[in-house]
Image (spheres, rainbow, N blue to C red):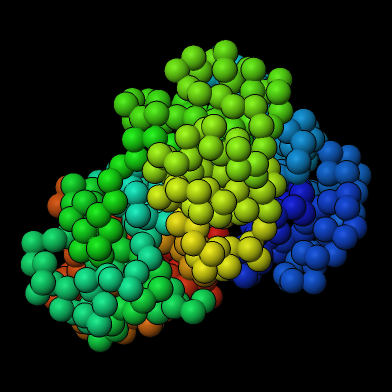
Amino acid sequence: MKIIICGAGQVGESIASHLAEEDNDVTIIDQNQERLRRVLDHSDVSGVEGLASYPEVLQKAGVEEADMVIAVTQSDEVNMIVCQIAHSMFSTPLKIARIRSQSYLDPRIEEIYNSENLPIDYKISPEHEVSIAVSKRLQIPGAFDVANLAAGNLQLIGVLCHENCPLLDVSTRHLKDLFPDLKMNIIAIIRSGEIIIPRDGTHKMEPLDRVYFVCDVNQIKRSMDAFGHEEKTANSIIIAGGGEIGKKTVEILQDKMQDIKISIIENNRDQANFLAEIFPNVSVINGDALDPEILTESGILNAETFVSLTNNDEVNILSALLARRSGAVRAVTLINKPSYIPLINTLGVNSVISPAQITVSSILSKIRSGSIKSIHSIIEEKGEVIEARALESSKIVGKPLKSLKLPKSICIGAVYKGKQLVIPVGETVIDVDDTLIVFVKKDAIKKLESILSIRMDLM
């Protein structure tokens, strides 16, 4: 598949890497030679230097033969124009644009996005996606990662195993004996930066393991309790950073958690005044989140959760650490630079939000084939949790799982048969149209393609 990616920032670089590893012909465009060179050095892609909205630059990238254009530059307007030119001049079949400004996402103008006006097939809003991710983490305290699966009936949760975790030294096969009626299944363990898939039941959890499991949405609390995470939902939250992500997060929290007390720390006076006007029930403080006096004024001594959502990674990390030291029980921080993410858990920050990872997952979900319902890239992008429909042509249909020789890099974590959740065992038989929740290591996507008899890299 021929794919052109416009924008070599963190999102463009990540999506280029993903798609190139799946044997697609990827060309990336960017004005910045240094950013472009970084992508070319790390991924098997071609590069074109220039402004992506110029037709001659798109032509140089091979847009006439392209099956898809993904516009993720820093400019909404450039992304829109890229899609317009790709459609009007070159008849590119699929156009995806990152749109950040909420003015362009207003439901009242939704009808402009069509082939006659602005031919954008899919719009990606990082701020909206990130805000939803933040709110999910806050609604499940103790989780460092959360995703909805199977139309909201199933939850993917990532938890850190502390020194007092009740499941330490318990083999995964014995979990079913300890909790016979608990519909929960461990699908991956991250230990010292490496992925472990505990399929054979012999693996035991160790302190500081980051564990991903899937569970019935009605059994989230029991599942969290099993790992020793009995944190209560926060009654008070302090948000550092009142930009678009912070603003949208407050809107979601006020809708989902009506009784919660929210404070916002915003360094820009005009933005702080604006937030105070639109959120009359929220305490808005104009100041620096790194200032201990400002943190005290915001109520950090009595706050359960501190969330740092500024556009500066260093400020986010330091303010989260300062908040924890000042009394906050839990800290959630937004990190843009992937290289920082492996360090965060060692510093005492409870949960990391990666805009690039979230945006990449959203884009991949939209460009995979029709049998793929959703995709969630796990932390550090070491693997993906994929929700897929079992096709009649799939090699796993009609056979007990124990008779299949599934690669060790793939784990079927849950099966939905109609409205019934099944935690798979060796005797489980996959039927046509079952919904599968599968964890796959990043380097095994092609193997999963073959097993499921689908093409995951095109629509």
Q: Is residue 176 left or right of residue 24?
A: left
Q: Is residue 118 left or right of residue 325?
A: right
Residue for point 65% across, 27% down: 286
Residue for point 55% across, 60% down: 457
Quadrant in which residue 257 is drawn: top left
In front: 394, or 383? Answer: 383
Height in image: 19 above or below 200?
Answer: above
Q: Where is residue 113 in the image (x, y as percent from the top left)?
A: 62, 25
Q: Where is residue 72 in the image (x, y as percent from the top left)?
A: 71, 44
In front: 262, or 336? Answer: 262
Quadrant in which residue 308 is drawn: top right
In front: 243, or 423? Answer: 243
Q: Where is residue 334 in the image (x, y as percent from the top left)?
A: 58, 49
Q: In this view, does 381 lie to the left or right of 69?
A: left
Quadrant in which residue 77 is drawn: top right
Residue for point 67% across, 48% down: 315
Height in image: 428 above or below 203?
Answer: above
Q: Decide if residue 49 is in sight here.
A: yes
Residue for point 88% across, 49% down: 31
